[in-house]
Amino acid sequence: VQLQAFGGGLVQPGGSLRLSCAASGFPLIYSAIAWFRQAPGKEREGVSCISSSDGRVLYADSVKGRFTISRDNAKNTAYLQMDMLKPEDTAVHYCARHRQYYCSDYGPGLMDYWGKGTLVTVSS
């Protein structure tokens, strides 16, 4: 089982980025996938989660209305579209596989596999 997150980079405030999470070794269709981020000196926090069964999505309050999580089961890939980026969004972003197929909660302890992070830097 592997997850690979990519798509990070440097973007100006107000800009957009799309992160991808490519899964291998398991069919994404049966798993809930979550995105997390960790800024320097801060704890890892949940950003968003998408369920496998009905595509239900959850977002952290800090990103509601700006970020959109999605999945393409045919490509075995999940995405995080990030719009209206702010400097406080600067962090290493990770994708992870949920132990359950449904995102009723998505704390780090509920994930069983993690991808390596991709750095998002929002700065002018």
Image (spheres, grey):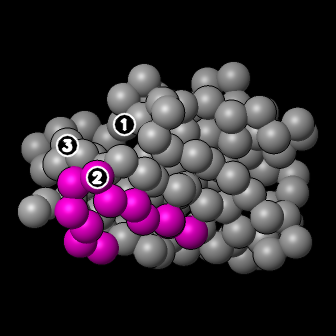
Residue bounds of the magenta highlight = 9-20
Mark 1 Cα within 10 Å, few/some/many (few <14, many 20+)? Answer: some
Whether residue 108 is visible here, answered yes or no, is no
33 drawn magenta: no
Q: Nearer the viewer, residue 111 or 89?
A: 89
Amino acid identity at mark 2? Gly
- Residue at left offset 47%, top offset 75%: 6
Mark 2 Cα within 10 Å, few/some/many (few <14, many 20+)? Answer: some
The circle on residue 88 is: 3
Tell whether 113 sits left or right of 61: right
- Residue at left offset 53%, top offset 56%: 81
Earlier sequence position, callout 1 versus callout 2: 2
**Closer to us: mark 3 or mark 2?**
2
- Residue at left offset 17%, top offset 48%: 87
- Vertically, is 30 above or below 78? above
Residue 45 pos. (x, y %): 36, 37
| C-alpha gap between disc 1 and disc 3 | 13 Å
Q: Quadrant of residue 79?
A: bottom right
The circle on residue 14 is: 2
The circle on residue 45 is: 1
| C-alpha gap between disc 1 and disc 2 | 22 Å
Amino acid identity at mark 1? Glu
17 drawn magenta: yes
Q: Are marks 1 and 2 in contact (CB under 8 Å)?
A: no
Q: Secondary structure at mark 1?
A: strand
Earlier sequence position, callout 3 versus callout 2: 2
- Vertically, is 69 above or below 46? below
Q: Nearer the viewer, residue 108 or 122?
A: 122
**Closer to us: mark 1 or mark 3?**
3
Residue 11 pos. (x, y %): 25, 67
